Image: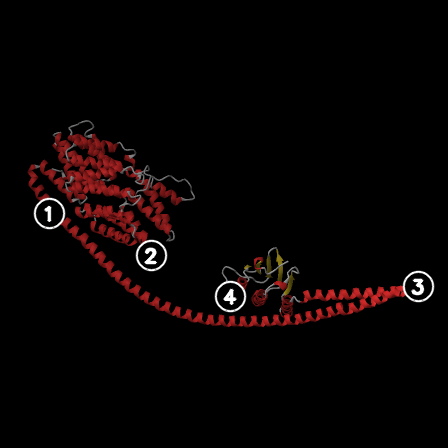
Amino acid sequence: MKKNYFIYPLLFLLLVFFGCSKKNAKGISVTSSEDSLSTYLSLANDFSLAKEKRLLFTQKAFNIIVNQDNDSLKRVNMFKVANRYYNINNWKQFNKTVHLALNISEKVNDTLNIIKAYTYLGDYYESQSILDSSFQFYYKAEKMYEKQGDNLKLSKTLINKATLQLKAGDLLGSEKSVFRVLRLIKGGKQINNILYDAYNLLGIIYSELGEYENAMSYHNKALLISDDEIIPKVFQSRATSYNNIGFLYLDSHKYLLAKNYFKKGLEQNNLIIQKPSLYAMLLDNLAYSKFKLKETEGLPDLFFQSLKVGDSLDLTSGMFINKIHLSEYFTSKNNSFKSLQYSKEALQLARNSNNSRNVMVALKRLALLEPQKSAAYTKEYIRINEELQKSERKMGDKFSRIEYETDEIKGENTNLETKNRNLLFGFSIITMLGLFLYIIKAQKTKNRELLFKQEQQKVNEEIYNLMISQQNTIETNRVVEKKRVAQELHDGVLGRMFGVRMNLDGLNKFNDEMAVNQRNSYLAELKNIEQDIREISHDLNREKSELINNFVAIVNNLFEDQKKTFKPKLVTIIDPAIKWELLSNAIKINLYRIIQESLQNINKYANANTIKVELKKNGDDLFLSINDDGVGFNVNKAKRGIGIQNIQSRTNECNGTVDIKSNKGEGTTITITVPIEQKLILT
């Protein structure tokens, strides 16, 4: 038959183990005077220091943080301070700090830290045995993690909830919570720390239910992963598993196996520093297993050593079972006085801590030691047992009611949120509809303006084409006329002059000096006339090439109008190597309009002092460069208007590229490049 009082150290160990999951690794001392907060937090977490000094450093850190602005760093540090109070079992300051952290988190709607505060408050009320309040906060955290879809943190919260249910005697509820955790983390990464807690819980649950094979199976699973790197060494997971397995063997009366596991637990490095509560428990369990094996070596010193450590840590549950063991030990030594003394001290501890189960264990023990009072002890035992059973049933019902009421409040809040959301949604639709109609109207207006400008542009092009055609007609007529004159000079005048020269050659028959001189004089004169006429003819033909260049003339007219009408100084350069007669009329129109559009933009917006326009042939490309020293604009942020769009469009029609460079206060440069592949220019 299992001895019930073994159950409670197991449960106490479980609570200590899970509670310690908040503990950080041993702090590293910081000596820099520039970061006093970091120094205080590190020293407060240095477990090699005395408890009083760690409390002092924690309080100093709290005094610094509480006066800081409410930012994310303050909230993080506030929880660090709460952890430090937790690690030294200062529950009053822990509760105060967590409530303050919750308050500042709610002010800025910091969801993650609100959930964290709920979890910490669940831990606090559990430590004070106010189980319904603890369950309520754990359940709030659980629902918020569900909403966020954070399965990892949800699993940790469910572990806390399952531990609480186990403590309240709701074994099936606790088992259900643990298996939900296992489903949530299935296939996940970095989850061995949660698995370890889950396996330990299941081991204790099945031990309580008397299913020792299942209990041993889960404790062994926990032992297999106890050395995983993700589980901090400070938690002493292996020592915890050895203690749990030892308990199972102790319950099964396999005392030798139990002793060996307790010894293994005590052999773990830094156990007394990192987890003194577990160290005290292992000492007591080892002593009890030796006592059951009738081994006297080290007894009763091991019991007293464990009691001393437990007393220094104020471990009520650990000290209770330790005194029960001492009572059994002294009974075996026929020392009824000390046996009765330790049983009564155990009873007083149980009553002071309001632990009904422990009270029942102590009463059962005293009934054996004081037969004359056995009836009174038994009567009280029965009364407490009945009250405990009712209390456990009520607590299970209360847990269910808390879940229902919390969900009901959440449902009401959800309905309210839904109504508000629907109102917001309806208002948003109306606003978007109005905005949409406005955009459509504005776009139609813009499209009308664009169509008007496009029509205007088309008319301008037609006018320009007429200008070009008229200029071409004039120049063509001039060329034809000049060609006719040249032909007349060449074929008519020169022909006649040639005849005169031939007639004069006849004077050569006369050899007198006078005839010879006259003939030579006429011949020389005729040659001069002939040369003059040839030069006139050649000049007329050469002028044709120059006058046919109508584009340059039109552009120059544009430049002259610019100079006469507007203030900025205009500098123009046109490369004479460009043979404009080989350019298509469409390309000329586009180049002319680009220059015209650019000058208009500069006159309207640039406030420039100097404008430079350059047309040149560079290698295989034709370049048009328009530069001003005006106010400039941000090319990346500026909204591109119709003018810039037209420049881009006309450049694309030439299969060219456009580059616009401008900065505020640094002027603007527009460079148009037309590739040679179009065969626009030939040299």
Point out residue 574 in the picture as x, y percentages from the top left corner.
Answer: 64, 62
x 20%, y 42%: residue: 202
Nearer to us: label 1 or label 4: 4
Point out residue 337 in the picture as x, y percentages from the top left corner.
Answer: 13, 33
Q: State which tag comes first along the sequence, 3 or 1.
A: 1
Q: State which tag comes first along the sequence, 3 or 4.
A: 3
Quadrant for the C terminus, please. Answer: bottom right
| Amino acid type, mark 1 | Glu
Specify the color scheme.
Answer: secondary structure
Q: Quadrant of residue 293?
A: top left
Residue nearest the observer in this picture, 308 or 394: 394
Quadrant for the N terminus, please. Answer: top left
Q: State which tag comes first along the sequence, 1 or 4.
A: 1
Q: State which tag comes first along the sequence, 4 or 2.
A: 2
Quote the CA–CA distance across marks 1 and 4. 88 Å
Residue nearest the observer in this picture, 402 or 502: 502
Point out residue 17 in the picture as x, y percentages from the top left corner.
Answer: 25, 41
> Judging from the image, what secondary structure is the residue with disc 1 in?
helix
Residue 214 visible (yes or no): yes
Circle number at residue 513: 3
Q: Is residue 600 left or right of residue 518?
A: left
Mark 1 surroundings: few (<14), some (14-19) or many (≥20) residues within 10 A = few
| Amino acid type, mark 4 | Gly
Mark 3 surroundings: few (<14), some (14-19) or many (≥20) residues within 10 A = few
Quote the CA–CA distance across marks 3 and 4. 88 Å
Quote the CA–CA distance across marks 4 and 2. 48 Å
* Residue identifier under label 4: 641
